[in-house]
Image (cartoon, rainbow, N blue to C red):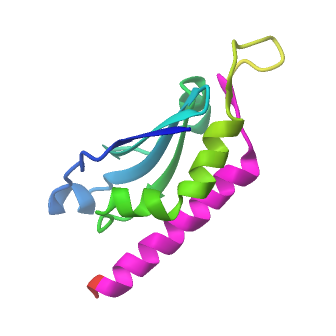
Amino acid sequence: MTLLINDTQPKLTSEQTLTGWRREFCVELLGDGQARIFLRALETASLKATELRQGILFHRVGAAFVDLEGCVEAARDALERLARTAVRQQPTQDNLFAAVTYDRMAWDSVVEVVERWQRRRHAVSA
């Protein structure tokens, strides 16, 4: 089981935050039990179908989210289950958009941990 963590923190200026820029917690499902975890900054929201073609799941996080490694550690069990169950596939007539199948309950568990982590971090910094 390999979780590749890209801990580069995308910076958002105050102006960007005020004009709608967002950060997203992303998991790229690579197959064979591997996943790449990273944060990215975007001016507009990601589109689920577009990202699924690349095998990327994402969840919006707040501007104050800074500890990716700590969050990954808190979500490690769910992330490993997600990576373990992911299967890369070629698009077919029945499934044109998703390049990967995955355990939806495992992803939901990751999202729950990320949400709890954000609230915890926010409460500590308040």
Q: Quadrant of residue 63?
A: bottom left
Residue 56 percent location from the top left of the image: 53, 34
Q: Quadrant of residue 53?
A: top right
Residue 117 percent location from the top left of the image: 46, 71
Q: Considering only vertical position in the picture, is 47 above or below 30?
A: below
Was residue 114 drawn as part of the magenta stretch in this picture?
A: yes
Q: Is residue 107 left or right of residue 30?
A: right
The front one of 85 and 95 is 85
Residue drawn at x 56%, y 38% as measured from the top left = 1
- Do we see residue 29 in this rendering? yes
Query: Total marks drawn?
Result: 0
Which part of the image, by quadrant, shows the C terminus?
bottom left
Q: Which residues are magenta?
A: 98-124
Q: Considering only vertical position in the picture, is 60 above or below 98?
A: below
- Do we see residue 98 in this rendering? no
Residue 94 percent location from the top left of the image: 84, 18
Residue drawn at x 31%, y 63% as measured from the top left = 67
The front one of 67 and 11 is 67
Residue drawn at x 72%, y 18% as measured from the top left = 96
Q: Quadrant of residue 121?
A: bottom left
Residue 51 percent location from the top left of the image: 54, 32
Q: Considering only vertical position in the picture, is 48 above or below 79?
A: above
The front one of 30 and 99 is 30
Identity of the residue furthest to the front in this view: 1
Q: Is residue 118 left or right of residue 109?
A: left
Q: Main secondary structure of the magenta part?
A: helix
Q: Is residue 11 left or right of residue 25?
A: left
Was residue 68 drawn as part of the magenta stretch in this picture?
A: no
Q: Considering only vertical position in the picture, is 41 above or below 121?
A: above
Residue drawn at x 61%, y 39% as measured from the top left = 83
